[in-house]
Image: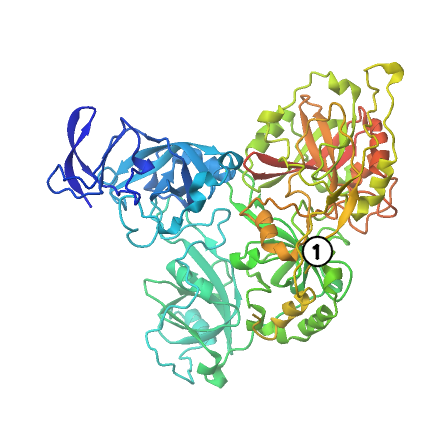
Amino acid sequence: MRSHARCVWQKEFRRKRCSARVPRSGGTSAFLQEPGLVSVLVLKDSPVPFPGLRPHFALLLVSQAAVLCREQLLVLQLRRYVRDQGSTVYFPQSVLSGDDLYDVTLTDGDCRLRVTLDPGLNQQVERRVLRAGSTLGQASFSPTFSDQVPGCPREVSYRLVNMVVRDEEEDGEDAGFGRLDLDSLPWFGSSELAGPEVPLRASRSVFLPLWNNVDYSGDAWREAPPPEESDEEEEGLRPAVSVSKLRDCFLSGRRGRARGQLIVRIMNKSQLMYFGRADENCECPYKAVLEVCDRTGSTCVVLWNSMCVSWYRCLKPGDIISLRQYRVKQRYLGEAGDIEISVNSRNPAAHLSLLSESRVSPEYTPPEPSYTFCHSQELLDRPHGTTCDVIGLLMFAGRSERVRSRDGKGAELLEYRWLQLEDDSGTQPITVKLFSTSQPEAHRRLHPLSVVVCTRLRLIRSDQSSFYLTNTTFTQVYCTGLDQHSQMSYRKLPRVQLFLQWLRSQDDGQVLSRALIGGFFIHPPLPVSLETFMKERKGELSFLRGAELQRELQSLCFRERRSFFVQATVTMVTYSLRGAEDRCMFWMERSSSSSSSPQLPLSSSPLLYLSPTPPSVRRSPSSPSSSARSSVVGLSTPHRNGGSRKWSKRKLMLAETPKKRLPWATPEPEHNTTVILFQASMEFLENPEEEEEQQEEDVSSFTTAPLPPAFQPVAMETLPMRFDHAHREEQAAVVTMEGGATARMFNSAPEDYYTLKLRVLSDGLQVDAVFLPHSSSSSVSSLRGHSNTWTSILSHGAFSSHGPPPSPADLIATADKLTNQRLVCVLEACHLGGARTELVLTRAFHLTD
């Protein structure tokens, strides 16, 4: 509603056109509360002072200056899209901040407001400092009017130009927002949004997901097919044209639009392909490719633009579709004679419909999709580049990470997860590096103990003994929990039936004890010698100075993974238990305590230190290191020489302490603990509609040294968690791109870890890196035996697989042998969001003169 009124402000009368909405509480919205910049007049039930004004209506006087909101605001939603040619009118400098723009939905508890984030603040989203659920203070807004910018979808809209993101611990329960029904809050300036939600600052019809360009995002993407023009289902349908006839007509020169009905079956479905660019104004720049066939041949159907929004989610391999009003073209990057069928919403407007099997005449029913399932033993002998399908029981589901698709600033980030599947053919798991496949619901359901089918994977072989599988353009993933297996034709294949027989014979408890989720993972294992490593890298390691490493870490986006190489020496080694970092063993080089080498301060260095984990729960180490724990407890505190306060070069801080009986952080008991695998297999047959016992154990802890080493505890995302079926959704929130924090302390495997302080030789900067020598991600069963000395452990990245690992006490006691050793260090960095960056040492090769 608009009205013209005189508002009293600083003893002056001014006439402005205003548009606002009074909060339901009868008070003033926080969006209107800045004296001198925004002037508000709230009319109560008293007589109306000005003709034409109604009670309970706020009048907003907006100036051209930035509006400062002193109230706390809650971020409800963040939406991403790519700017277009007109976006530079709003943001002349946006080209300097990349192609992405973000719309932010905020609330003050009384109403909601959509604003655009100033591109200069994009890094706050990209590093997940600003996210849905964040509380903002001191937010500044700059207004933009439609008469200044033609084509603006709203009369008055705003951009967020500055704010302070408050810490979660500082705000408690979201500053009181948790008690509100946020979905029922009115919109500032209107009763509801006019039409579907679209980007504010670009001519785009749909939003992109926050973390990749492959998945779909938003309610615009249809789950069900659009209604057909006729409700009467015609049976015995016959195609008017075949694939072979279309090809013959195209090759003979009769090209262009074909109006005959084509009935084909989808054999394979590609991921979504986004081709939007900042210098183009295409509203829906998407395409998807379907490999289809009938009884005469096969070809490709390309869905363009809004046809993807209407149909991509509705179609799956095995479906039969009918096409009319399409175009036949030369296949893009295809050989001469290859054709593709172009399906667009205009020029001409194509007609696509989904047919049931019974509606097609039997003699024209297209053949079923074909599958090439391989078990783990068969993959050992398959050559590099082989395309295959796999089925297995998911035993390890890694965290979501991202990697740049190509070198260079601003390159697209590709999201992926590592998976390990077990089947009935051997003990070696099937390792899959699974990138996004435009199936976000399926990827979020990739919990351990799910039956997973991945189709059209490509085998990558680095050497004869190490390989993994990864995506092709047409890779699809299906998992239990979404009623997918029962709809797919592969469930009838003999190879799948053999796997299901093996699955039903497995014991839930035994399988559950080995299942892991999240954590640092690297595959294939790196070489164990510097010569081999240099050869694989073609001699190009690009060693960084410490300052250069710091800058690179600052540039990482959320969950971006990169490798770095530095030459360094070890100045301190620390052994810790997760959750009990205040009680640790460590060795420190004597000269490092008085050294003037530069080091990033703890309070201002989110780059080189891991996120803090409060030691509220003390837990014993996992089984692989239980022998190490007992050996440590038996050690005594070293004596000081002659009563002097000067410590010796080798500092081993251990002492006898009273044993405390503390609970393990175990999942709560759940009923029906023996049916998980059975239910997973039942989904192949029909549409279907664990527990660990609580236990206590004596925990022997280490006494804290008088001056404990200054380092941050390991992040929850770094150590793999033992899968907790009862709390699988909570665990998944930690490892997926949503990155949700949890107060629950899950059991890790392992629970102990080492931290090495490295001094970069080039400029003396000191960094802390986690070292995981017992991690299953850094060691494989084929590792050759070695001596378990520090030099061999660091070069292999793992303990020897041919004997028990050395005790932590023994390793700390021999850490002085690392003094002044020059090492080539391979560091894996991953930004974990906010002020947390993980730095893991995977290899350290000794340099000899």
Q: Which residue is mark 1?
A: 515
**Residue 96 or residue 444, whichever sits in front:** 444
Residue in front for this viewpoint, 534 or 751: 751
* Foreground of the two, 71 or 372: 71
Report x, y in % for residue 128.
51, 39
Q: Which residue is depicted at the point 44% across and 50% down? A: 208
From the top left corner, tell me how far across and down residue 441 is, in percent.
52, 58
Residue pictured at 86% horizontal, 34% vertical: 810
Picture quarter with the C terminus: top right
Is residue 439 visible in the rendered structure shown here? no
Look at 69% across and 44% down and name the residue there: 719
- Badge 1 crowding class, 10 Å Cα cut-off, few under 14, some 14 to 19, many 20 or more, is many
Classify mark 1: helix, strand or loop: loop
Horizontal side of residue 469 vs 133, given as left or right:
right
Q: How is the image coloured?
A: rainbow
Q: Quadrant of residue 842?
A: top right
Position of residue 690 measured from the top left corner of the image (x, y, whole percent):
68, 60
